[in-house]
Structure formats: C-alpha cells, structure tokens
Amino acid sequence: MPSGSATPTVSIIIPCYNYGRYLRECVASVLSQEGVRVSVLIIDDASTDDSFQVAAELAAGDRRVCVERHRTNKGHIATYNEGLARVSGRYTVLISADDLLAPGSLERATALMEAHPSVGFVYGGNVRFRSGEQLPGPRVFPEPPSSQVQAGREWLTALCRAGRNIIASPEVVVRTDLQQRLGGYREELPHSGDLEMWMRFAAHGDVGICRNVVHAYVRDHDTNMQRTRFASQVSRLVQRRDAFDYAFGHYREKIDPTGRLRRAADRSLRADAMWWVLHCVYHRQLDAQLAGLLKLVLGVGGDPGGSPGKVRRGARIAVRLLEMLPLLVRGARRARQDRAEPGQPASFVSTIAVRRPILVSPGIADRAEHRA
C-alpha cells in the first residue's frame, strides 16, 4: 500500500494481568485517537480480578475491541509475543493496561512514518503520574512541537553513551512488517527486553522522534512490575547489562564491529553503579546490594551478590570515593553541558531524550494553547 493512500491502520496490544481497575481508561484513550483506524486486542493473562469481565464488556460495546483469555498465567513476555504474532495493522502499539495514550499521538507518529519509509519506530514524550491522582493537565514545553528522523546508527551511539533505556514503551509506535521480521521479546530479558528491542530496531532502520509533545501517560503505582519484581538497583542494572550483552552478542557485526559502542555502554553502566555505591555508603546501607553494585563498578561478571567480607572491604573503598563526590558532581555537570552544546557528536541529552514538560498554572496553559 503506498504511503498516504489510506488512513493508517494501527493494531493495539493491551496485555492485562489484574489491572481491571485501569482497563476502561486505557482502552478509551486508544479508541478516541483521531486520524487512524485502530483495532484493539486485550490479552488477559489469567487475572484473578475482574479484568476479563471488564474486557468482555468493552468488546461487546465496540467491534474494534477483541479479547483473548489465558487459562493459566504465561507471564508478560509470552503475552507480548502472542499479541505481536496476531497483529494485522500497518503499525503496532504495545501498551500496558495501566497506561494511557495521549490525544493525537498515533496520528503524529504514523504521519512521520508514512512520510519516511526508512523509519522503523517513532516515540514521543511521556508523563508519569501517581495512581489515584487526577491525570496531568495541559503541558507547555520550552519549544514548539517538532519531529526528527535520526539515523539508526546515530541513535544507537547516543543510547550506548547513555547506558540506559529512555523510552517507557507506550509512547512508541512501530512498523509492523519490520517488527515481524525482527521477532518478539526475549524471555531471558524480563525487565530490559524493551531496551534490547529498540536496539534491534535501530540496527535495521531509522528512528523517528516527536519532541516537545506528550505521547503517553505512564501510571506509577505500588503493583508496578519494577516495584514488585525488580525493586533493587542491582537487579535493574544487571538487566540493563544483560540487554546490552545480548544485543552485542547477537548482532555485533551490524551495530558495533569495532567494539566502540559496547565500551561506551559499559562505561555508562559502571558510572551508574558507582553513583548507587556512593548513595548506599552515604545512607549507611552496607548490605549485599552494595557488594553487588561494587562488582558492577569493577566490571566483574557473574552473580552480583557478595559476602559480608566483600561488603566491608567495598564499603571502605566507597568511603574514600565519597570524599571525591564534589569533583564527581562537577565533572558530571561539565560533561552534561558539553554533550548539550550545538554541533557536538550525537549524545543522550541533545539527540534522543524527549524534553520533559514544564508544569504551569491552568491559566498560563490555556493561554499557551490558545496561541497555538
């Protein structure tokens, strides 16, 4: 189908496990999207709450919504991949049942990909909000909304220098045919599979970025997976390391033949681990997590756990390093300024980060929207 010949079709996958209380709001944010034709697949992963009943009611009320129910819990990765295998739209979105799409996000993203066939995925900004609180109101950004197409290799370079994933996920729209060629999420990366996925996409296409505009709202609550299964900094950093290891181990020749990006990612991960070492020492959290963080700082492989003896020795080293904290902070500020300078090489700050909105009073927001 030639670009622009018809209204873009978008398949929406909504995996749901015990998020029935959020499901209606999530589906409403999808079905209200303008400028695209959406189809919704809700996959209930054997929830023990009323998720399936809510999903069935939504499907009965709108023919664009379909529901699949698991008899036994298969886990989030298997559920994601089941949905990806069943999509039929030109574009695909995977959004958790507790998150929301912002108005106009699908139209903006698909328009960018329709105009640029080399783009494999597009993302915009996201806003986090606490469950139970009112959805954030209008936002005013420091600059007008804009879009950019960035070469996949350049985006990968910036990502590796950052050493972390800057995409929450619901703000992403992917090209379905490329997704199906690249395959689904990796079972061995339960917490960082999306990081590896975006690296895989960028290795096979360009990246579209919608700046200074909100594309999704990410709900923060006590049953978020990052709070229940991956609460410790060690587990999060190890999962990030594993995602980079997987990417460089499976398609290094395509994205990093010289090993330069892997070294950049390793430096960034170790720097993050060092920051958390100082945090633990400052707050006297001299436990096994400190030993694990120190192993990450030193680049030691294997299980990041540690014995009490290692913790004590690591703590003494960290106390000395803590004395250098003012220098570390000064150097970090200078590095951030350098990366943000116009004309500098691709970097996390200036190329792939989507600026956060500035919170303003309703009156200012209304006037800004009126001017737009």
Image (cartoon, grey):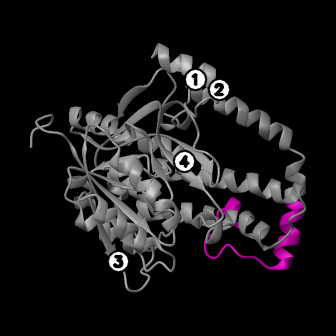
User: Outermost residue, bottom direction?
Assistant: 72
Cα gap from disc 3 to disc 2, whole angstroms: 43 Å
Write down the residue under mark 4: 264
**Sequence order check, earlier mark of 1 and 2:** 2
Q: Helix, strand, or loop for circle 1?
A: helix
Write down the residue under mark 2: 360
Identify the magenta region: 295-317
Q: Position of residue 83 (x, y in %)?
A: 31, 67
Write down the residue under mark 1: 365
**Sequence order check, earlier mark of 3 and 2:** 3
User: Is the residue under label 3 in contact with that under label 4 (CB below 8 Å)?
Assistant: no
Relative vertical location of residue 42 with respect to residue 93 in this rendering, above or below: below
Q: Residue at x 82, y 54 (%)?
A: 278
Q: Which mark is residue 74?
A: none
For the residue pair 123 and 284, the one nearer the viewer reads as 123
Give the quadrant of the C terminus: top left
Q: Position of residue 194 (x, y in %)?
A: 44, 58
**Sequence order check, earlier mark of 1 and 4:** 4
Is residue 300 in view from this perspective?
Answer: no
**Sequence order check, earlier mark of 4 and 3:** 3
Other-residue count near label 4 (Cα within 10 Å), few / some / many at <14 / 14–19 / ≥20: some
**In front: label 1 or label 4:** 1
**Sequence order check, earlier mark of 3 and 1:** 3
Q: Residue at x 65, y 26 (%)?
A: 360
Other-residue count near label 3 (Cα within 10 Å), few / some / many at <14 / 14–19 / ≥20: some
User: Is the residue under label 1 in contact with that under label 3 (CB below 8 Å)?
Assistant: no
Q: Amino acid at mark 3?
A: Arg
Examine the residues drawn in magenta and state their main secondary structure: helix
